[in-house]
Structures are given as structure tokens and as C-alpha cells.
Image (cartoon, rainbow, N blue to C red):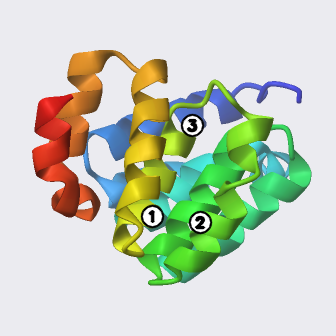
């Protein structure tokens, strides 16, 4: 995929910065100034997903993530964002089913087994959740992983297990 041209690249970076600072209104303002050609670029669509996710607009976020996956199916983030949006819409079983084959298609993406652990835990399959956690642990720095897992509400039923890792 071609990189964004100037000034779209600058506007996208500004929007990303605003999102990192927690200002979705400023990010949206930057995105409104993008050229028509930039609107369908996967990097811009991912920023839009992040914007909608930050606002809790999960239906719209899901639609945007689906477009990313259609435009660039080799980009794991489109699929990951789709599954996360489904999970946030309380469609966790669908999120799990979408993500399962991607664990093998993108074996180095640590967020995939991590999210599968979350979804499995939420669905009550703690044995499967532990297996996915161990796979994620192999792909992520230990302390970062443990801290994230211990604070994740989806993994609350496994806190005792996580503490022993």
C-alpha cells in the first residue's frame, strides 16, 4: 500500500497524536481535512477505527474495521479490530470465531492469542483461556504481558493463575 502523500500524512500524524492525548474531538477535526483520496487509505481507516473506539461507537468501528480487512486482508489489525468491536458489542462468540483462524495466519501477533484468551475466559472456557495466555506470553515481554493481563477485566477469573506465571 502506498504511503499517504503530504499534507494527508501530516494530518494523519496529527490525528494520531490527538488520539494518544485522549482528544477525540481534535483528532476528528484533523481527519476532516484529509483529501478525498486519503479517506480510503487503510492507515486513515485505522485512525477512524481508533476514533470511534475511543468514543464507544462500536457499530461504526466494526464497519470501519471490516473495510480495512477488505482493502488490505494481509493487515492483521483490520481483523483484530473487527473481533474487538464484536466483543465490545457483546458478540464475543463471533469475535472468537473470527479470530481463531487468524492465530495461525498471523502467528507472531501477540494480541491475537491474548484476545482469544480474553474471549475464551469471557465465554467460560478457562482451560482454553489459559492455553491462549501461554501462547501470548511467548510472544510478548513477560512483565508487560503480566501487568496487562492482571489488570484486564476479561481475565479476572484467571487472576490467581496469572499471578503464578
> Circles 2 and 1: CB distance less than 8 Å?
yes
Label 3 residue SS:
helix
Q: Nearer the viewer, mark 2 or mark 3?
A: 2
| Mark 1, other Cα within 10 Å: few <14 / some 14–19 / many ≥20 | many
Looking at the image, residue 141 sits to the left or right of residue 96; the answer is: left
Quarter of the image for residue 147 reads: top left
Q: Residue furthest top?
A: 141
Residue displayed at 28% across by 63% down: 154
Closer to the N terminus: mark 2 or mark 3? 3
Closer to the N terminus: mark 1 or mark 3? 3
Measured as percent of width and height from the top left, residue 84 is found at 51, 62
Measured as percent of width and height from the top left, residue 148 is found at 23, 38
Residue displayed at 50% across by 39% down: 111
Q: Relative to 126, say whether 133 is above or below.
A: above
Quarter of the image for residue 65 reads: bottom right
Task: Name the mark on residue 94.
Answer: none
Which residue lies under the disc numbered 1? 120
Question: What separation in Å lies between label 2 and label 1 (alpha carbons)?
Answer: 7 Å
Measured as percent of width and height from the top left, residue 1 is found at 88, 30
Residue 52 visible to an observer of this rendering: yes
Task: Name the mark on residue 11.
Answer: 3
Quarter containing the C terminus: top left
Looking at the image, residue 159 sits to the left or right of residue 74; the answer is: left
Q: Nearer the viewer, mark 2 or mark 1?
A: 1
Label 2 residue SS:
helix
Which residue lies under the disc numbered 2? 96
Compare residues 153 and 13 and report the one nearer the observer: 153
Question: What separation in Å lies between label 2 and label 3 (alpha carbons)?
Answer: 34 Å
Amino acid at each position: 500500500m502506498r504511503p499517504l502523500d503530504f499534507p494527508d500524512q501530516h494530518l494523519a500524524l496529527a490525528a494520531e497524536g490527538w488520539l494518544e492525548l485522549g482528544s477525540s474531538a481534535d483528532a476528528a477535526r484533523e481527519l476532516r481535512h484529509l483529501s478525498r483520496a486519503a479517506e480510503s487509505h487503510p492507515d486513515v481507516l485505522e485512525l477512524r477505527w481508533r476514533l470511534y473506539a475511543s468514543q464507544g461507537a462500536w457499530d461504526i468501528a466494526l464497519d470501519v474495521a471490516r473495510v480495512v480487512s477488505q482493502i488490505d486482508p494481509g493487515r492483521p489489525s483490520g481483523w483484530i479490530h473487527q473481533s474487538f468491536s464484536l466483543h465490545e458489542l457483546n458478540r464475543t462468540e463471533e469475535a472468537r470465531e473470527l479470530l481463531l483462524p487468524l492465530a495461525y495466519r498471523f502467528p507472531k501477533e501477540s494480541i491475537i492469542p491474548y484476545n482469544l484468551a480474553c474471549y475464551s475466559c469471557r465465554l467460560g472456557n478457562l482451560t482454553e483461556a489459559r492455553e491462549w495466555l501461554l501462547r501470548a506470553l511467548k510472544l510478548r515481554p513477560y512483565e508487560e504481558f503480566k501487568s496487562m493481563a492482571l489488570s484486564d477485566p476479561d481475565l479476572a477469573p484467571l487472576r490467581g493463575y496469572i499471578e503464578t506465571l
